Image: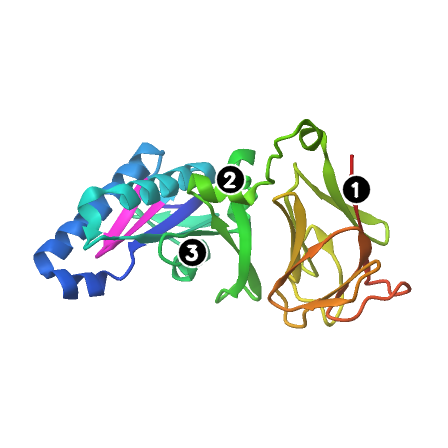
Amino acid sequence: MVKDIELAILFADVVGSTRLFEELGDQRARAMVAICIDVMRTATEQHNGTVIKTIGDEVMATFPTADDALNAAGQMQKQINAHAELKNEGHAVVIRIGCHFGPVVIEARDVFGASVHTANRMTSQAKAGQIITTAATVERLSPEWRASVRQIDVATIRGQGGEVALYEVLWQTEDVTSMLPAIALNAHDRRRTLRLRLRIGEREVVVDNEHVQMVIGRADECDLIVRGNLISRLHARVDFNRNRFVLTDQSTNGTFVQMQGQEEAFVRRDSVAIKGEGMIGLGKVPTADDAQTIRFVSEEN
């Protein structure tokens, strides 16, 4: 029976398993991989998931919701990271995880479709100890999980017809804490509210404590859409991190930032802190009379 449905698809595999077999021998390495597979399977089952298949050192699983998938992924990373039997001369065996939410076809206890390939691609983009996911997954997350993701890059996915934003899921408590705005100790700072307003034409978006990230570009899924030949689909993003606003360029042609009273800054695949007020140009120098110029102003209450 063939069935169409939307699910979260997750792939998890052991990083460097070939080297593990070379260093430790077949018996010990196989035992370590088996422990990882067991942790992955248990985490999947405890968070409403279904293990579709295991292939060597890799597990493929599906979940009804994006939160279920990340709950399982976080548990996998934490338990494998802390497992005493997964130490190789002081170095822990690690896994990487990729996840995507989208439509799949279920047939004969297997799942098929472009979403499966996208999830697998997220795994190949992940480094050791990382969980990487897509905007489609992030959109379906609860506020708690959404506060624990950050966009880190873009990638071209075969069959997708363009760039896809890559998001890292910060599963370690200290990582989440460092990403969130720092909490000041004195009473004045606790009362302080910071926000950054970005405007182009009649469209305005705000970055603040409740909306800690926004994406600028010509793609329809961007928070602030700007059309132009020099503008990438996902051109740049602005994050609120440690009580400051940071613009990160992820484009082909770079981003120009002109803050009032300061020299013009140019960033390409790099970041710059922005404050006060000024203008942003995507792929070109911003000018006051250019319809593609983004104006910004930071406010404090």
* Residue 236 in the figure: left or right of residue 101: right
Q: Which residue is mark 1?
A: 299
Residue at the image point whose x is 66% and y is 41% from the top: 211
CA–CA distance between discs 3 and 1?
A: 46 Å
* Cβ–Cβ under 8 Å for marks 2 and 3: no
Residue 249 image position (x, y, % from top left): 64, 63
- Verify whether residue 52 appears in magenta: yes
**Label 3 crowd (10 A; few <14 / some 14-19 / many >=20):** few
In the image, what residue type sits under mark 3? Gly
Magenta span: helix, strand or loop, mainly?
strand
Q: Nearer the viewer, residue 212 or 52?
A: 212
Q: Earlier in the sequence, mark 2 or mark 1?
A: 2
Q: Which residue is mark 3?
A: 113
In the image, what residue type sits under mark 2? Thr
SS at mark 2 in the image: helix
Quadrant hosting residue 269:
bottom right
Query: Mark 2 or 3, which is nearer the eye?
Result: 2
SS at mark 3 in the image: loop
Residue at the image point whose x is 89% and y is 63% from the top: 288
Q: Which residue is mark 2?
A: 177
The quadrant of the image that shows the C terminus is top right
Instruction: Report whether residue 165 is seen.
Output: no
Quadrant hosting residue 264:
bottom right
SS at mark 1 in the image: strand
Which residues, given as a range, are shown in magenta?
A: 50-61
**Label 1 crowd (10 A; few <14 / some 14-19 / many >=20):** few
Q: Nearer the viewer, residue 143 or 301?
A: 301
Q: Earlier in the sequence, mark 2 or mark 3?
A: 3
Instruction: Report whether residue 292 is seen.
Output: yes
Point out which mark residue 8 bears. Answer: none
